[in-house]
Amino acid sequence: MSGALLVAKGVTKRFGGFVALGGVDLSVGAGERVGLIGPNGSGKSTLVNCIAGTVRGGGSIEFDGHDLAPLPPHRRIRLGIARSFQIPRPFASMTVLDNLRIPLLYAARAHPLLQRSRGRETEEALSILRQVGLEAKAGRLSRELTQVDMRKLELARAIASHPKLLVADEALAGLSASEVDEILAILLEMKGRGVAVILIEHMMRAVLRFSERIAVLVVGRKIADGPAETVLRDPAVERAYLGQ
């Protein structure tokens, strides 16, 4: 993809004799919405971990023109890569508001946008909470939140680092249909802010609604990548992922 924000080429990773990734290519454009799907154990999380820097693999990964190979995870965050996790781990004894003040004050301290807003962390945190629908719960302890509100807080903490790319890893798992719609609305809004999103998800209804493009991994290899309607008609995808 010409002018892509993220360009991963030939990404490989072995765990002992197990090949988790066998030469995976993935490109994501600025503001693009990409669904990353595949059966359990297909290598989705390993690929994301290689992008985030928590796992080191072979191949090359560039982000916004930077070679990520020498950069530790915190440097990648400062470049604009953020992720949310299926199991949120907020600071349970802190308020929802303070859970956002932490990344605004420290984790993304070197980000130029945060340099300009230093001293206005509370105001910015409230703005992000408003964006995800948690402003009314800013003063509550995070451990008191419902499951869907925990997911919203997890996304808010990722948004607080001013990402150019957000990876949402199983952000919809275990939620009701209406709760899924709430989280999808937050993720869909990211495009208007110029933020690219990779959604890792098993819920096909949500993937189809969200994605402009879908990439499919099976046993560590990418078997399809393109518009949803094209990918889901691919016989290899039907056999490997949809069980047909």
Image: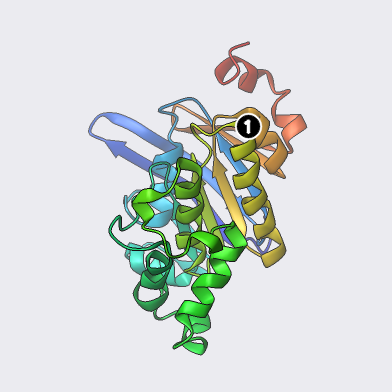
The residue furthest right is 229
Give the left or right position of residue 20, taking residue 129 as reference.
left
Residue at 55%, 63% (x, y): give it. Answer: 135
- 139 up-or-down from 41: above or below: below
Q: In the image, is residue 204 above or below residue 103?
A: above
As rendered, which of 112 and 184 lies closer to the eye?
Answer: 184
The answer to whether residue 10 is above or below residue 156 is: above
* Nearest to the observer: residue 88 or residue 24: 88
Q: Quadrant of the N terminus?
A: bottom right
Residue 96 percent location from the top left of the image: 42, 62
Q: Quadrant of residue 45?
A: top left
- Residue under label 1: 177
**Which residue is pictured at 53% across the width and 76% down the height?**
124
**Residue 125 placement (x, y as % from top left):** 49, 72
Find residue 213 and report its image quarter: top right
Residue at the extreme top of the image, as rendered: 244
Secondary element at image label 1: helix
Q: Is residue 244 visible?
A: yes
Is 121 placed above or below 214 here? below
**Is residue 64 visible to us here?**
no
Q: Residue at x 45, y 29 (%)?
A: 42
- Of residues 165 and 192, the one nearer the viewer is 192
Which residue type does callout 1 highlight? Ala
Q: Position of residue 24 (x, y in %)?
A: 49, 41
